[in-house]
DNA sequence: CTCACATGTTAAG
DNA sequence: TTAACCTGTGAGC
């Protein structure tokens, strides 16, 4: 679940549920108990996402900084008759009379200052989901790097919010080999990828899923049987290794790059060949 | 039921 | 490079 779209969706839901209200803050699991006591009863002004980081702003410019990591969840429930007892290891619970939100398994849950929040933002690249994002900053990071574009897309200091699913799918949609060096891209290629990301991820915020298959390639349009992926969306290559490419039929390949699984089609995303020699 | 692995990142070795 | 975070899902027995 937790790529950038998930965090932006969560920020929206938290703001709707708690924005402008005094919130009961607790830590049933205990690891956030001291901080929760300091915040208990304070007004939550708004929640905001920056890449995969989430910040909930409380009175006096205090922020709860959350990063879900790989396994974290933050469940927001509104319109309840009564707030139920916590289930499992709830590190942070926000609650009002009619809403509650439970955080479990997060890699970061901390009470931070505005300065600390600004530091996280400063270390992040532009976020395609933010209207104030500057794609040229990301291009600068891509253009000067000899690292693979498949690694740069996941580098949160180059751009913020892309995870393994969006990486695999964006590269497929642009027919780009994951190992192509960043400094071999043309600016037009990067602009097209960035523009595509802003649309795809904004759709992801609305739907809560990652859907990347174009209408002309859906199973229905291709006369194939419909299919459902683990994560609930329709994708071209993510975790489809060994299965036929939805466009050309060749087997989807997989490899590990910097500790993360990579997926691509060898025919649709041919290896990049430098023009420098020969 | 138990086990491995996952849309992520940091810190220790 | 590996463990930790410690949830959720799917595969396999």
Image (cartoon, coloured by chain):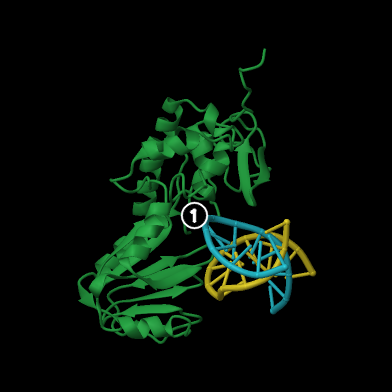
Chain colours: A green, B cyan, C yellow
Is A159 displayed left or right of A223 in the figure? Answer: left
Residue, x 56% and y 40% (percent of image)? Answer: A150
Q: Label 1 crowding class (10 Å Cα cut-off): few <14, some 14-19, many 20+? A: few
Which residue reaches farthest left?
A: A20
Residue shown at 37% from the left, 64% from the top: A116
Residue receiving disc 1: A232
Circle 1 — which element? loop
Instruction: Give the residue drawn at x 42%, y 72%.
Output: A110
Residue A44 seen? no
Q: Chain of mark 1?
A: A
Q: Is residue A112 left or right of residue A31?
A: left
> So how many labels did they put on this image?
1
Say which residue appears at 33% left-offset and 63% top-offset: A115
Residue A171: % across, % down: 52, 37
Residue A233 lies, in percent from the top left, at: 48, 50
Whether residue A19 is situated above or below residue A90 in the rendered picture: above
Q: Position of residue A217 (x, y in %)?
A: 49, 35
Residue A181 in view in this figure? yes
Q: Is residue A231 above or below residue A42?
A: above
| In the image: residue A227, left or right of residue A92 | right
Q: Is residue A122 above or below residue A248?
A: below
Q: Position of residue A223 (x, y in %)?
A: 53, 35
Q: Is residue A46 left or right of residue B11?
A: left
């Amino acid at each position: 679940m937790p790529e950038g779209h998930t965090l932006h969706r969560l920020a929206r839901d938290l703001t709707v549920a708690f924005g402008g209200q005094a919130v009961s803050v607790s830590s049933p699991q205990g690891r956030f108990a001291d901080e929760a006591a300091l915040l208990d009863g304070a007004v939550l002004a708004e929640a905001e996402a920056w890449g995969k980081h989430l910040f909930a702003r409380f009175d006096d410019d205090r922020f709860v900084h959350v990063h879900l990591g790989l396994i974290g969840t933050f469940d927001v429930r509104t319109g309840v008759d009564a707030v139920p007892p916590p289930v499992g290891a709830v590190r942070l619970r926000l609650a009002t009379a009619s809403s509650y939100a439970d955080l479990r398994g997060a890699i970061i849950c901390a009470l931070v200052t505005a300065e600390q929040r600004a530091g996280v933002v400063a270390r992040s690249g532009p976020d395609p989901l933010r209207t104030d994002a500057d794609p040229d900053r990301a291009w600068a990071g891509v253009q000067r790097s000899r690292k693979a574009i498949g690694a740069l897309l996941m580098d949160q200091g180059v751009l913020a919010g892309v995870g393994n699913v969006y990486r695999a799918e964006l590269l497929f949609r642009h027919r780009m080999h994951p190992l192509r060096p960043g400094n071999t891209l043309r600016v037009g290629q990067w602009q097209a990828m960035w523009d595509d990301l802003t649309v795809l991820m904004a759709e992801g915020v609305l739907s809560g899923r990652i859907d990347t298959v174009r209408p002309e390639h859906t199973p229905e349009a291709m006369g194939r049987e419909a299919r459902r992926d683990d994560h609930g969306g329709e994708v071209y290559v993510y975790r489809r290794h060994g299965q036929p490419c939805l466009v050309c039929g060749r087997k989807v390949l997989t490899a590990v790059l910097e500790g993360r699984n990579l997926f691509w089609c060898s025919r649709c995303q041919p290896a990049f060949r430098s023009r420098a020699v020969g």
